[in-house]
Amino acid sequence: MLSRARSLLLAGFFVFLSSFSANGTEEFANPPTPLLVKAGEQITANLFNLIFLFDRVASDPPTATTPDYLERISKPSSPFYGDYLDYRRGRISRAELVRRLPHVAMMGDSLTQHFYISSPISLFWRARTERRKNWFLDTDPDPASIHSVYERLATFTPLVATEYNGAGALVASRRAGEGIRRRIVRTRNLSGQARQILRKKRLPDLIMIWIGHNNLDWTEGLSLTEREHPEKRLQEMATQFRVNYTEPLQSLIDRAKSENHNVMIVVFGLANIDAFFKARKKAEAIHARNPAFYPYFESGYRSFESLKPPYQKNMIRLSLMMNAEMRAMVADLNREAKNYGNVRVQYSDALTKVDFSRLEMINPVDAWHPSVEGHKALAAAAFSSLVPRLEFLGIRQKSTAKHRLDFSKYGAR
């Protein structure tokens, strides 16, 4: 039972969250925050996290380790057999042994989460506690569940996977405040996610990034007159997007240069927004006939105005411009890192090619985020794009697990 103080705080926050869900649930870039305001926001967020510490117990951890890794690396044929012997002889700790396994990190926004818009209470809870159950990280052995990238990689090698993505994450300047709302739901923008990774003792072998969808709301702050001629605005947004993306990516590359293992960073292009709108149009027709279907369909229009039909064409246009900027950015960064044989940065359009025009691919609640089927398709596409790159990471493309691992036998890790 919640204490009286906690209940009052929760009730007050849900009133606050109601406006949050209707006005920028995910999609607004914050300007630089004054120091005193930033300090106040940090104190408030810390207090809130302390009071609601109980939700950590209800959350799956954002990191998963292959449960049978010890058994698998104990075989002489394992590339980690030498590390296993060091562990058995007491030369290294269990923690150090795990650190030597391949590490994979996921940076992104709500399209890499089991997330969708619903009532303020459930939205808040889902944003804070939902981990796994997505195309990158899922450990459910049920054949009907998502066969995630983590599970697919686990058939080749034991590994450690961590998700840093969060609902509402933006590609924004590191000097921009993340805002009290994002802090309370524990979301960090791309720069903040990069800082989390850089704090780790060991940089992940593979870093996957899929972010930028929350930067597509091109109508925000524009008058009706300005919206009729958005060319300058779109170009400015695409240019700034690249600048803000390059900064954290460069910091990861600089750290990778000093690592004693190979590091691969894969930048995924944005989802196919044109295809997405085709599915959303079908959902709209169904919702118009029966509002019980896609009950939070309108939430998209309220919090992301560029989703409205008159503005969709330019949202599609902006997504293509941003993809072009990401592709050029990666090419430039790769040229700069060419003298470092242990670092590779690659652009992938694998997730852009996923066909989101099919109705079953979008969430049945908000017609905005991926459905379970959507997550399955994203997992398959992402993994297929990774397979040719595994050799660079020293991962043998030969299954060492005879079947899809049943993680339930080992408990949560």
Image (cartoon, grey):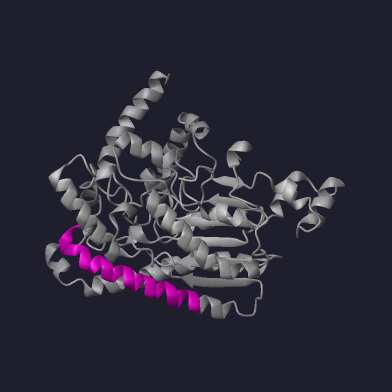
Q: Where is 119 relative to 370, above or below?
A: above
Query: How many numbered marks have been drawn onto this rendered protein structure?
Result: 0
Query: Seen in the image, is 150 located left or right of residue 354?
Result: right
Residue 326 within the segment the image draws in magenta: yes
Q: Where is 148 relative to 326, above or below?
A: above
Q: Where is 220 relative to 389, above or below?
A: above
Q: Quadrant of the N terminus?
A: top left
Is residue 114 something that shows in the picture?
Answer: yes
**Residue at the (36%, 44%) spot, across then down:** 181
Is residue 178 something that shows in the picture?
Answer: no
Query: Seen in the image, is 380 located left or right of residue 167?
Result: right
Relative depth, front residue between 346 and 35: 346
Residue 201 within the segment the image draws in magenta: no
User: Which quadrant would residue 94 be assigned to in this image?
Assistant: top right
**Residue at the (58%, 69%) spot, across then down:** 389
Relative depth, front residue between 300 and 336: 300
What percent of the width, then of the height, locates residue 231? 22, 74
**Residue at the (42%, 19%) spot, across then down:** 3
What percent of the width, then of the height, locates residue 390? 61, 66
Relative depth, front residue between 176 and 49: 49
What percent of the width, then of the height, locates residue 164? 50, 51
Relative depth, front residue between 114 and 403: 403
Q: Quadrant of the C terminus?
A: top right
What percent of the width, then of the height, locates residue 270? 38, 65
Query: Seen in the image, is 13 located left or right of residue 264?
Result: left
Region rendered in magenta: 308-331
Residue at the extreme right:
89
Instruction: Tell me the chief SS of the magenta region.
Output: helix
Query: Seen in the image, is 289 located left or right of residue 30?
Result: left
